[in-house]
Image (cartoon, helix red, strand yellow):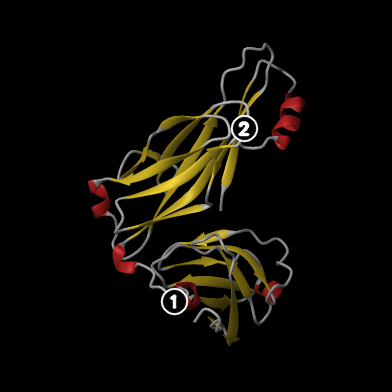
Amino acid sequence: MKRKNILLTSSLSACLLCVMVAQQAQAAIALDRTRVIFNGDQTSVSLNISNQNKQLPYLAQGWLEDDKGNKIQTPMTVLPPVQRIEPNKPSQIKIQALPQAAQLAQDRETLFYFNLREIPPKSDKANTLQIALQTRIKLFFRPAAIAVQKNSAPAQEQMTLSRQGDSFVVNNPTPYYVTIIDASNMKNGTGAKGFQPFMVAPKSSVPLTVSASSVGSAPVLTYINDYGGRPQLSFSCNGSSCKVVPDKTTS
């Protein structure tokens, strides 16, 4: 999922005004996707960006972070790190693999974060509030050995649930990261109250963030796929173990 941060620079001391303006802010620099899949057989990935402001040029600054949020320069880098984009004009930013990318795990995905910050032109007016938005999205390095085959069933259908009392544990035996954004007791049903989105790393397990009773005996989980879509996984339970009922439209 995409996350945006707001950076404020101002000589104004009215904090309430800052909050009100920030809530109404819209990004000038727009990104064409909500996640990046960097396949192991690629040397680079180009992202489309654009300046949505029709009057002012903006600087676009890009960088990468590891899964802990630390800025990194390897095994991939962003080119150019800073560029000027004219009003209402498109551009591109490239994520380039370095030789160190060959040292990443080859049996599972590796998680990074791509950051894009807009830098507005300096105002020549006194007491001006400037707002800069920052976009942060997930970047998954996917080795060639686990490339997704065309027309194959979604790997997420291999996921299982294990019931422990009034809790479910989500088991991900696949080599892919899976982001779960909703849970319900029926397909296309209302999401369970109090649910918090979470991500399950490859070959690992994470507790569901709501009680087992809130999703019933036939839980439905919604995840985000490679294209930003939101498919649902319907589970059938037998005792304390639940398996996905394959979707015939994607099998």
Position above or below: 77 against 38: above
**Vertical position of residue 238 compared to residue 225: above or below:** below
Q: Position of residue 229 (x, y in %)?
A: 57, 63
Amino acid at dot 1: Asn
Residue 130 in which image quadrant? top right
Give the numbered dot on residue 102.
Answer: none
Mark 1 or 2: in front is: 2
Q: Does dot 2 land on a helix, a strand or a loop?
A: loop
Give the Cα separation between the discs numbered 1 and 2.
40 Å
Q: Nearer the viewer, residue 236 or 76?
A: 76
Q: Residue at x 45, y 73 (%)?
A: 155
Image location of residue 54, percent across then percent down: 63, 31
Mark 1 or mark 2: name the one nearer the start of the chain: 2
Name above or below for residue 76 compared with residue 186: above
Residue 129, picture quadrant: top right
| Residue 14, position as x, y percentages in the image | 75, 21
Q: Residue at x 71, y 27 (%)?
A: 18
12 sits to left or right of 101: right
Give neighbour class at mark 2: few <14, some 14-19, many 20+ (Cα, 10 Å).
Answer: some
Location of mark 2 (residue): 53
Give the mark count.
2
Horizontal side, residue 130 vs residue 82: left or right: right
Q: What residue is drawn where x is 56% and y is 22%? A: 121
For label 1, the SS is loop
Is the residue marked by circle 1 packed among few (<14), some (14-19), or many (20+) residues within 10 Å?
A: few
Side (left or right) of 43 relative to 66: left
- Residue 150 x %, y %: 41, 73
> Mark 2 is on which residue type?
Asn
Q: In front: 44, or 181?
A: 44
Q: Tell me the residue at 34%/68% (across/down).
A: 146
Q: Which mark is residue 151?
A: 1
